[in-house]
Image: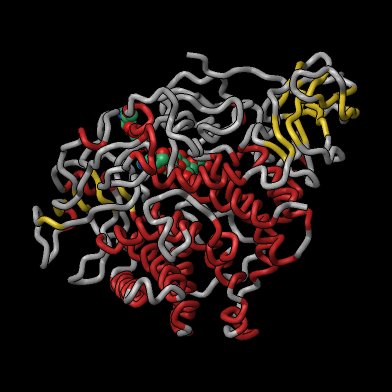
Amino acid sequence: RPLRAQSALQLNQVGFYPLAPKVAVVAGAGGRTFSLTRPGSQAAVFTGQLGPGRRDTLAQRAVQLADFTACHDTGTFVLTVPGAGASAPFRIGPRVHAGLAQAALKGFYYQRASVALPPAYAGALSRPAGHPDRQVLVHPSAAGPGRPAGAVLASPGGWYDAGDYNKYVVNSGITLGTLLSLYEDFPAYCARLDEHIPESTNALPDVLDEALCNLRWLLTMQDPADGGVYHKLTNAGFDGMVMPAACTTPRYVVQKSTAAALDFAAVLAQASRVFRGFGRPLPGLADSCQQAAIRAWGWARQHPAVYYDQAAINQQFQPAISTGEYGDHDLRDEWQWAATELYVTTGQLSYYQAAPLPAATSAPLPGWSRVRTLALYTLACHPKALAALGAQSAPPVRRQLLALADSLLAGAAASATGTAMGHQAADYTWGSNSVAANQGIALVQAYRLSGQPRYLRAALANLDYLLGRNATGYCFVTGAGTHSPQHPHHRLSEADGVAAPVPGLLVGGPNPGRQDHCAYPSALPPLAYSDTVCSYASNEIAINWQAPLVYLATALEALQVP
Ligand code: G3I
Ligand code: 9MR
């Protein structure tokens, strides 16, 4: 199997907006000119000079940039650089990422657990239901007064987390927070999205229908006896590379954790205020979400330091659990996120005061274990709630978010490829593509706060990165662009008998950690990507990587980059 197809020209393979920046990276140095032609024609419709040679230190190569921003024509084009070859055809046009945004949202539908996907919505990817999760066992680590070990509960639905078939509360937290923020930030555009799902005809925007699918599952993860939230619903070990309907091993809820309770509280508080606006079609839902959030918060206050430590659990209980851990032992940010969401939804200051946001200079980039900045996004979207905190205690939301975005702009300016993503080696972690997408969201937020187009341009450059303007030359979304992953570590894609992977899914991306010990074409951070089923450390897909892709692509479409 080919690990990587080398191309000297790296650009967004989906396309460009007519009036927005258009940049391709040309590997190598010494070229002088480039041209754009129409497919099948030799006649140049645009010509330009390549930029100066630059050193791409992390990829250990020289590059030049081909900037064709000034080409405002629409249609299909080919980029040609004498000595470096020609690109695959790409588009310039308005709404050029609309299909990608829609496909990325649809990616969540294909991850749905416990339900059949009928041909009307899934086409060739139609499949019978699996993992009904109606008889989930209470793992001994989760035994409590009302539910002893071995007790049975129903916890159906939701999304599979990733390439595996388990369902994790912590990772559902940031995922839902990101999708709900997309709706809160761009309600009008979201109302027009059509994901083509069974719920598309109802009164709710599809992105909220999709989120609701996982929220309803999340509600079942709360123990009604005490308000605590199980950390995850899982097999003891990972399922094989088989379809859901072939999976029959027992499923468990495991130990309740403080992280799960706080992420649950944050996202259900946010959901409550979002669904409050749709009261009539969803009677009682907003109240249920709010009560669940408050109860989870109360449990966390009584159990502030119950960390999920799988090794410790396995020393005490049977069966041993070997699936994803999502362990986090620093919950200051989870407290702050939950406190802020509960405050904004209820208006009660006491929540915010229980875990106020720090006056740090810069906001950290979000990730599944780093959620403080999600609270800042919420306050940025709710200026009245922010103002009501009073000059004394309101956190400097604008200053902190602009500081984050400015550091990304500085990184982009200093990087050889002109993208914020990859300006530092630390960007290349497990799930690095979600770093690129989350940087893009941070830049969109800065644009919303400041109106400065430079932030929007940098956000678009990170979408370019994900869609092909990167050292591997891959468009990292399955089924998109002209050179995309064919072998993701994704049980559904591997086992479904369809040659192509499930479309619209963002793979993890370059990860020099290479914890899977698979064959990689390179150990260099930007090139440590392996398009093989083996590679769960660089080529899996995951809901917390997918959500920021959906946000970024949808936000850029909504804002129609000038
Ligand atoms: O935070 C440290 C950082 O300080 C250090 O510099 C760096 C050096 O390698 O490591 C960082 O920690 C890494 C962490 O991800 C950062 O998020 C760990 O090494 C790395 O092992 C860890 O990977 C996590 C992986 O599970 C293994 O636990 C990923 O974040 C997480 O997204 C991934 O999630 C899995 C689920 O467990 C199971 N389902 C699939 C899902 C996606 O692969
Ligand atoms: O398939 C699993 C993937 O979803 C996880 O992200 C990854 C890390 O926890 O683990 C994968 O499972 C592997 C297991 O950890 C080790 N044996 C090989 C499994 C992959 O087939």
Location of residue 482 in the rendering, given as x and y in whole percent from the top left corner: 61, 26
Coloration mode: secondary structure
The residue nearer to you, when weighing 561 against 252, is 561
Location of residue 90 in the rendering, given as x and y in whole percent from the top left corner: 70, 31
Rendered view: 206 above or below 126: below
Is residue 126 in sight in this rendering?
A: yes
Picture quadrant of residue 510: top right
Q: Relative to residue 152, is residue 367 drawn left or right?
A: right
The residue nearer to you, when weighing 516 against 276, is 276
Q: Relative to residue 418, is residue 71 drawn left or right?
A: right
Picture quadrant of residue 22: top right
What residue appears at the point 87 percent right and 30 percent down from the top-left corner? Answer: 51
Location of residue 305 in the rendering, given as x and y in whole percent from the top left corner: 33, 64
Rendered view: 440 above or below 480: below
Q: Relative to residue 534, is residue 440 drawn left or right?
A: right
Picture quadrant of residue 424: top right
What residue appears at the point 29 percent right and 64 percent down from the top-left corner? Answer: 219
Rendered view: 401 above or below 197: below
What residue appears at the point 59 percent right and 47 percent down from the top-left corner? Answer: 437
Instruction: Please tell me in which quarter of the rendered image ligand 2 is found.
Output: top left
Q: Relative to residue 333, is residue 31 drawn left or right?
A: right
Is residue 430 in sight in this rendering?
A: no
What residue appears at the point 60 percent right and 70 percent down from the top-left corner? Answer: 381
How many numbered marks have been drawn onto this rendered protein structure?
A: 0
Location of residue 428 in the rendering, given as x and y in whole percent from the top left corner: 57, 37
The residue nearer to you, when weighing 14 against 42, is 42
Rendered view: 445 above or below 276: above
